[in-house]
Amino acid sequence: MIDGERRILCLTLGALAELETAFAAGDLNGLAERFSSGRLKAADMIRVIGAGLRGGGNLFSDDEVAAMNVDGGVAGSARIVGDLLLATFGEASGEATANP
């Protein structure tokens, strides 16, 4: 639940390309390595959630995402990011980021 609504999030190829650029990752492996560190800033979570929302067909800017309320606060945002990364990259990346 984001801003009181169920939203679809998906890290499509376009969303992943967006994240590669945002995080200056040379490729998907570099992106997965960055996320597997388990250390994400709030700005990183905004980018991942924003990319997931846009990949799911929601047209929100990262600035709009930053102002949204997520059920569960920061921990809820971390769960969303962890779930997205788990669905995209597999267990190792998702587990590392699921804990804020």
Image (cartoon, grey):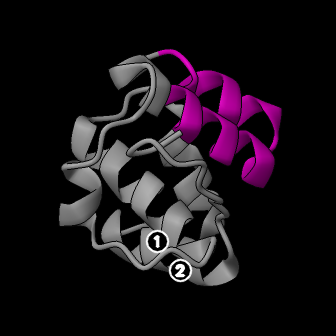
Residue in the picture at 56% in, 27% down: 79
Pointers 2 and 1 in contact (C-beta within 8 Å): yes
Residue in the picture at 60% in, 34% down: 82
Rendering coords of residue 13 (x, y %): 67, 80
Q: In the image, which residues are magenta? A: 78-99
For the C terminus, the image quarter is top left
Please, what is the three-letter code of the amino acid marked with disc 1?
Glu
User: Is the residue marked by circle 2 packed among few (<14), some (14-19), or many (20+) residues within 10 Å?
Assistant: some
In the figure, 74 relative to 29: above or below?
Answer: above
Return the residue nearer the eye: 97 or 50: 50
Residue in the picture at 58% in, 23% down: 98
Element type at marker 2? helix
Q: Quadrant of residue 28?
A: bottom right
Please, what is the three-letter code of the amino acid marked with disc 2?
Ala
Tell me the number on the disc at residue 20: 1
Tell me the number on the disc at residue 17: 2
Q: CA distance from mark 2 to mark 1?
A: 5 Å
Q: Is residue 21 left or right of residue 94?
A: left
In the figure, 55 relative to 84: above or below?
Answer: below
**Badge count:** 2
Rendering coords of residue 71 (x, y %): 45, 27
Rendering coords of residue 12 (x, y %): 68, 74
Return the residue nearer the eye: 71 or 74: 71
Classified by dominant secondary structure, the portion drawn in magenta counts as: helix
Residue in the picture at 26% in, 65% down: 62
In the figure, 96 relative to 49: above or below?
Answer: above
Check residue 93 for magenta coloring.
Answer: yes
